[in-house]
Structures are given as structure tokens and as C-alpha cells.
Image: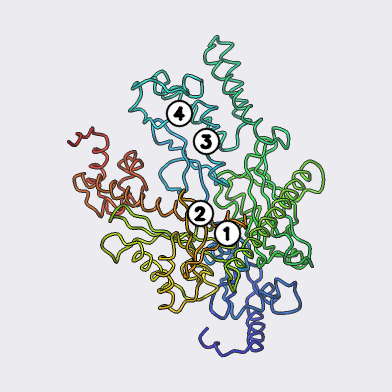
């Protein structure tokens, strides 16, 4: 794009029209860029020329016009098939996160349920990492709360141990816990349960996680009757108890259909055209219905910039929802045979999506927009839920905006503090001096923008010097680019410090030296270690208790930055202790100990790992893996 730097707006429009008309009429992906070279939109089409040229000819709705006017240049990649174009579009959207694309949260952040079936006595655990270790993974789920509720229900229903004992090592050691006594655990620790019987329970859990609750109930009922006829009454009673537990599990979920209903329902609520900016945001709800019950659900709120439109020409081809739905199912382990949509898709896109998702699922998946009957009812229910979620979100955002206005008024700020950063210092004597930065954007904590600073430039404990170093390092990252997605490159509108006027003076000096006029206030605590007031550099205390919404916000921010900083400091201390334990193993030095901790995350995970898993860590040889494995399975002498 170097040769095009001096183009005027009129020249750019003519250049884009000519370039788009020269595109081939073949399937492919187009990448729109602004004048800074940033990717702002990615799309796919069965005919690149026909689709891309539409953006630069004729009239469009407001969102499309805004996006097209921001385009300075575009690139394109031709593909052999539309399936290939759809997959490439999905990949590029995840890579560039364009401003005008509707997109999902990165699938890496979703939780999964893991069954380590390679182990002789598998356990059910939650994980955010999918690794090729031979385990079964189920999900992704909408939240960790959902995951743990499912795990808890399976453990109670099937009698799978939830304790921290290791099997088979701990079989026959110690008395059974209370879960065995009240019938919530099969009692693997007693030695009365064979490996085959336990493995059967795990297989039942896997069947349920695949969506086969009804099939599991039918299979257990059939086995119960057969055992009863053969006078195997204990086994029949065991099957009966599991059937009853599974039925109770279903009763706790919301029933929306008959037991044979197995589908996903996508309901879209869009605000009407002409509504003002204060209106509700577009929202899509997904109901994951298994055996007639809503097993899980998700809500997706779309930014105002996202190219959602009801223009007839958009529905004629290349719907923006096609890649969104493809992304939704790209990482799911189980996909039902039917996906119901409350909104229409172009027939061509629906056929393409059906082929793509069916290939992912390994079986035929029917995608349709029902017009009547029970399926239409499910879609209407999902749309209604999306509308309620949109309304509640807007009400919450309005309350948060009002709180920020009140805060700005109390502190006499020139601008609304949309981005607020809070800082705290924590340490253990002279060791592990740590600073934590907690960020709130538009009145809500944004954990992805939290940052930790390890204090490097001082000897001994000096909170003021530590705070000076942190703010200097923080300001050095600011670029002033409003389009930047990196947290440290964005300048805050307000800085709050967990401390008094001394901390405020220290930070103000750093600000003046660096030339940043960012407002700074200290969060002062009372004798009960609770937030009392805010203080400025003149030691003037500002009473925030008279404005309850502001008080609650500042209090929660101060508590959060303190919690986060102490947690990060203690985590650094624990890692030092854990690393030192690993360094006791023959052949394991600081570098290899750090590599093991980085790969597995916890000492417990390293202790449980098999030799093959340990060998996968970069820098760990077969001899090292064997040494670590043997060390944790040999009783170590106590240090005197």
C-alpha cells in the first residue's frame, strides 16, 4: 500500500471500484483494510467480483456504508471451493478480530470436561486446554459454573469419586468418606468395586456427556429387568438407583419438549431500524436441548459496528451469520442432528453450512427455519430470551454509565472515565514485591486487561519507590492509538491507587515527568480496612459514601485490586517453592523445573503425569521424565 499513500478520498473510491471490477468470478475470501493497514472486515463469496464490487456501488444501510467508507484497500484469496472459503474466512476472523465482523469469544477460553480414559481409574475434571493426550473432551460449555454443575451431577448420579484420593494407589487405605456412607459414591477406596464395574460407570458418564441421557436410561432399564429375571438382585438394584438418579437429574433442568427432542436452537433479536443509540443491542441466544431439556445456553451480544442487517440483498447471498454459525460449531464435540434458526438464511448459504457442519459432526445435520409447530415455539422462546437478555444488558449499562457520570462529577473530571486503572503493591518482606493493575472499562471489571508487575529496580521494601517504578513502566507502553487492542497501549482516563496522599504525590511526579495529565486519586481505608474516601494530591478527602453507586464501585475496585495483587504475589511465592521441590530431582535444574511448571501449571499435575506426558515438555528427556515419575512415586524422607 506504499504507492497509494497520497490518494484522496475521491481517488480511493475510484481505485476501489476499479479494483473490485477486476476481481475474478471465483470463490474466495476478501480482506478489507483501513488507511493504517488494519483489517476491519473479512468476508467470503462464491463470486469475488460480484460480492466485493457491491460495497463500492449503489446505496447501502448505515452500517455497511460506514464500513465501506473506512476501506482504503483490500486483499483477496481465491479458493477452489466455497467450503474452503468458509473455513478460511473463519480462520482469518479469529486471527484479525476485525471491527465489523460478528465473532465469537476465542474458543480457547471456553471450559471443557475431560475424561482421562487412558488411566486405569479415570476421573472427570474441568480443563480449558485440549491436548492430544488420549483423553475424551466434551464441550465447550458456556461457563465453569455449568461445567462444575454437570460434573457434580454426574458424580452424584453415577457414584464416581469426587475426593482427592489417587487410585489405584489409595484403594484399601483409610476409611471411606461420608459420600460413601450417604450413597453418593460407589466407594472405590474400599476395594469392593472392580475396575470393570468402575469403567462401566465412566462409560455411562461419557454417553450422557455425548447427549445420550435417554439412551443411557433405556439401556440401564433393560439391564435392570434382565438382571432381575436372572435373580441378580444386587445388580438390578444398582441399575434401578442409577435410573432414578438420572431421571431426577433431568427434572432439575427446564423441560421444553418430549424426551426425543435433541437439537440446538438459535434465536436472534435485532433492534428495529431507526432506533436511537440508547436502544437495545442485537443479541442471539443459543439453547442446547438434550433429551427434551435445556442442558446449556449462551448469549451473544453484537457490537453496533457488526454488519448485522436486514437488507434483502444481504439475505440473497453470503449472510454474515454463516461464518458465525460455522465458528460456533467448529470446536464443539457433540453436534445434534438438527439446528433450528429463528431467522432465514439464503438457501445457498444454508446448504453450504449444512455440508460444513455435517462434515464436522460426522453425521447429517439438518439446518432449518421452522414456520409452525413445536419447533417454531422453541425458536420464539429463544428470541424472547435474547430480547430479555438484551434489555437487561442495556439497563445494566445505563446504570453503569450513570455511575461514571456521578464519579466524574464528584472528582471534577473533564472527561467520562471510561477506562479506569487501579494499582496496589504487595510483598512478603523484601521478597516477591509485586504490583497489580486492575482495569474497569465502562464501569465493569475487564479481567483480560489485568496486568502484573514484578518490581525489579529496588533493594528492600519501599512502596513509594515500587509504585514509581510501576507507573513509569506502565506509561512507557502507551502509544495513543485508539484502535489498539493491547491493554497497556491504551491510556487510562483515571488512575486509582490503594494508598494515601503519599502514593498520589509519587505518581503525580511520574506523570509530570512523562507529560501525561491523567487524574490520580488515592483510595483511603478506615480502621476496619474498608474503603472510606478518595484523596487527591492536596490531601483533600472526597466523601463518596453519599453516592451509593459510586461507593459500591470504588469499594469493589479496591477489594479486587488488593485480592488480585496478593494472589499474584502468593502465586510467585508458591512457584518458587514448587520449583525448588522439582530441583531436588536428579537432572532437573531451574530451567527444566520452570518448563515443567509452565507446561503443567501445578505440582499436583506433574505428580500425576505419566512418563509419556512428561516427555512432551520441551527440554525434558526420557531420562528426566523417568526421574520425575519415579521421584513422585517413591516415598521421600522427611527433612529434619
Marks 1 and 2, the one that precedes in the sequence: 2
Residue 147 horizontal/vertical position (percent): 54, 41
Dot 3 and dot 2 residues touching (CB under 8 Å): no
In three-dimensional space, the C-alpha distance between marks 2 and 4, rounded to whole angstroms, equals 43 Å
**Residue on which the image places disc 3:** 151
Rendered view: 20 above or below 548: below
Q: Residue furthest top?
A: 231
Dot 1 and dot 2 residues touching (CB under 8 Å): yes
**Residue on which the image places disc 1:** 544
Residue nearer the viewer, 485 or 66:
485
Residue 407 horizontal/vertical position (percent): 60, 64
In three-dimensional space, the C-alpha distance between marks 1 and 2, rounded to whole angstroms, equals 9 Å
Q: Residue furthest left?
A: 640
Marks 2 and 4, the one that precedes in the sequence: 4
Would residue 28 be visible to someone looking at this image? no
In three-dimensional space, the C-alpha distance between marks 4 and 3, rounded to whole angstroms, equals 11 Å
Residue 186 horizontal/vertical position (percent): 47, 22
In three-dimensional space, the C-alpha distance between marks 1 and 3, rounded to whole angstroms, equals 43 Å
Return the mark for residue 161.
Answer: 4
Dot 1 and dot 3 residues touching (CB under 8 Å): no
Return the mark for residue 531.
Answer: 2
Q: How many residues crowd around disc 1 within 10 Å: few (fewer than 14), some, or many (20 or more)?
A: many
In three-dimensional space, the C-alpha distance between marks 3 and 2, rounded to whole angstroms, equals 38 Å
Q: How many residues crowd around disc 2 within 10 Å: few (fewer than 14), some, or many (20 or more)?
A: many
In three-dimensional space, the C-alpha distance between marks 1 and 4, rounded to whole angstroms, equals 50 Å
- Considering the numbered disc 4 on the image, is that residue within a helix, a strand or a loop? loop
Marks 1 and 4, the one that precedes in the sequence: 4
Amino acid at each position: 500500500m506504499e504507492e497509494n499513500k497520497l490518494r484522496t478520498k475521491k481517488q480511493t473510491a475510484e481505485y476501489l471500484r476499479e479494483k473490485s471490477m477486476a476481481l475474478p468470478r471465483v470463490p474466495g475470501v476478501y480482506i478489507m483494510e483501513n488507511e493504517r493497514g488494519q483489517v476491519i472486515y473479512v468476508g467470503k463469496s462464491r463470486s469475488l467480483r460480484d460480492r466485493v464490487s457491491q460495497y463500492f456501488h449503489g446505496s447501502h444501510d448505515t452500517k455497511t456504508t460506514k464500513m465501506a467508507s473506512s476501506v482504503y484497500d483490500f486483499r483477496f484469496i481465491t479458493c477452489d471451493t466455497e467450503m474452503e472459503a468458509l473455513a478460511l474466512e473463519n480462520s482469518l476472523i479469529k486471527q484479525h478480530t476485525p471491527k465489523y465482523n460478528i465473532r465469537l469469544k476465542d474458543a480457547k477460553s471456553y471450559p471443557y470436561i475431560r475424561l482421562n480414559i487412558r488411566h486405569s481409574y479415570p476421573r472427570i475434571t474441568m480443563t480449558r486446554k485440549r491436548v492430544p493426550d488420549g483423553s475424551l473432551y466434551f464441550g465447550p460449555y458456556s461457563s465453569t459454573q455449568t461445567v462444575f454443575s454437570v460434573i457434580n451431577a454426574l458424580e452424584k448420579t453415577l457414584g464416581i469419586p469426587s475426593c482427592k484420593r489417587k487410585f489405584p494407589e489409595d484403594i484399601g487405605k483409610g476409611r471411606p468418606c461420608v459420600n460413601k456412607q450417604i450413597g453418593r459414591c460407589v466407594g472405590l477406596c474400599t476395594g469392593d468395586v472392580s475396575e470393570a464395574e468402575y469403567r462401566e460407570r465412566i462409560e455411562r458418564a461419557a454417553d450422557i456427556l455425548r447427549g445420550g441421557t435417554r439412551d443411557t436410561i433405556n439401556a440401564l432399564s433393560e439391564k435392570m429387568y434382565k438382571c432381575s429375571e436372572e435373580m441378580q438382585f444386587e445388580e438390578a438394584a444398582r441399575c434401578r438407583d442409577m435410573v432414578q438418579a438420572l431421571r431426577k437429574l433431568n427434572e432439575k433442568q427446564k423441560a421444553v419438549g418430549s424426551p426425543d427432542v435433541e437439537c440446538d436452537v438459535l434465536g436472534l433479536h435485532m433492534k428495529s431500524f431507526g432506533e436511537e443509540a440508547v436502544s437495545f443491542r442485537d443479541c442471539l441466544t443459543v439453547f442446547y436441548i438434550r433429551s427434551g431439556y435445556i442442558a446449556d445456553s449462551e448469549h451473544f451480544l453484537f457490537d453496533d459496528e457488526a454488519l448485522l442487517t436486514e437488507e434483502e440483498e444481504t439475505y440473497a447471498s453470503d449472510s454474515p451469520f454463516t461464518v458465525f454459525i460455522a465458528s460456533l460449531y467448529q470446536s464443539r464435540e457433540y453436534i445434534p442432528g438438527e439446528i433450528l434458526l429463528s431467522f432465514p438464511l439464503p438457501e445457498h448459504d444454508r446448504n453450504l453450512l449444512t455440508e460444513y457442519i455435517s462434515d464436522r459432526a460426522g453425521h447429517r445435520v439438518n439446518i432449518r427455519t421452522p414456520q409452525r409447530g413445536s419447533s417454531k415455539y422453541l425458536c420464539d422462546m429463544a428470541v424472547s430470551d435474547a430480547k430479555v437478555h438484551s434489555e437487561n444488558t442495556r439497563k445494566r449499562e445505563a446504570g453503569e454509565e450513570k455511575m461514571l457520570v456521578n464519579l466524574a462529577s464528584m472528582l471534577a473530571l473533564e472527561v467520562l472515565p471510561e477506562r479506569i486503572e487501579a494499582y496496589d503493591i504487595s510483598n512478603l518482606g523484601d521478597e516477591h514485591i509485586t504490583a497489580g493493575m486492575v482495569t474497569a472499562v465502562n464501569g465493569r471489571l475487564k479481567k483480560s486487561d489485568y496486568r502484573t508487575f514484578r518490581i525489579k529496580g529496588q533493594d528492600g521494601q519501599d512502596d513509594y519507590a515500587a509504585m514509581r517504578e510501576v507507573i513509569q513502566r506502565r506509561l512507557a507502553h502507551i502509544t495513543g492509538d485508539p484502535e489498539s487492542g493491547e491493554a497497556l497501549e491504551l491510556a487510562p482516563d483515571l488512575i486509582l491507587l490503594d494508598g494515601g496522599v503519599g502514593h498520589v504525590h509519587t505518581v503525580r511526579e511520574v506523570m509530570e515527568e512523562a507529560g501525561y495529565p491523567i487524574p490520580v486519586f488515592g483510595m483511603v481505608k478506615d480502621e476496619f480496612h474498608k474503603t472510606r474516601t478518595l484523596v487527591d494530591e492536596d490531601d483533600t478527602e472526597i466523601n463518596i459514601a453519599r453516592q451509593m453507586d459510586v461507593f459500591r464501585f470504588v469499594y469493589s475496585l479496591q477489594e479486587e485490586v488488593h485480592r488480585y495483587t496478593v494472589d499474584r504475589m502468593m502465586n510467585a511465592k508458591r512457584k518458587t517453592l514448587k520449583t525448588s521441590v522439582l530441583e531436588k530431582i536428579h537432572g532437573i535444574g531451574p530451567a527444566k523445573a520452570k518448563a515443567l511448571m509452565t507446561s503443567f501449571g501445578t505440582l499436583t499435575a506433574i505428580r500425576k503425569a505419566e512418563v509419556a506426558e512428561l516427555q512432551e515438555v520441551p527440554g525434558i528427556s526420557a531420562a528426566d521424565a523417568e526421574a520425575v515419575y519415579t521421584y513422585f512415586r517413591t516415598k521421600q524422607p522427611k527433612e529434619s
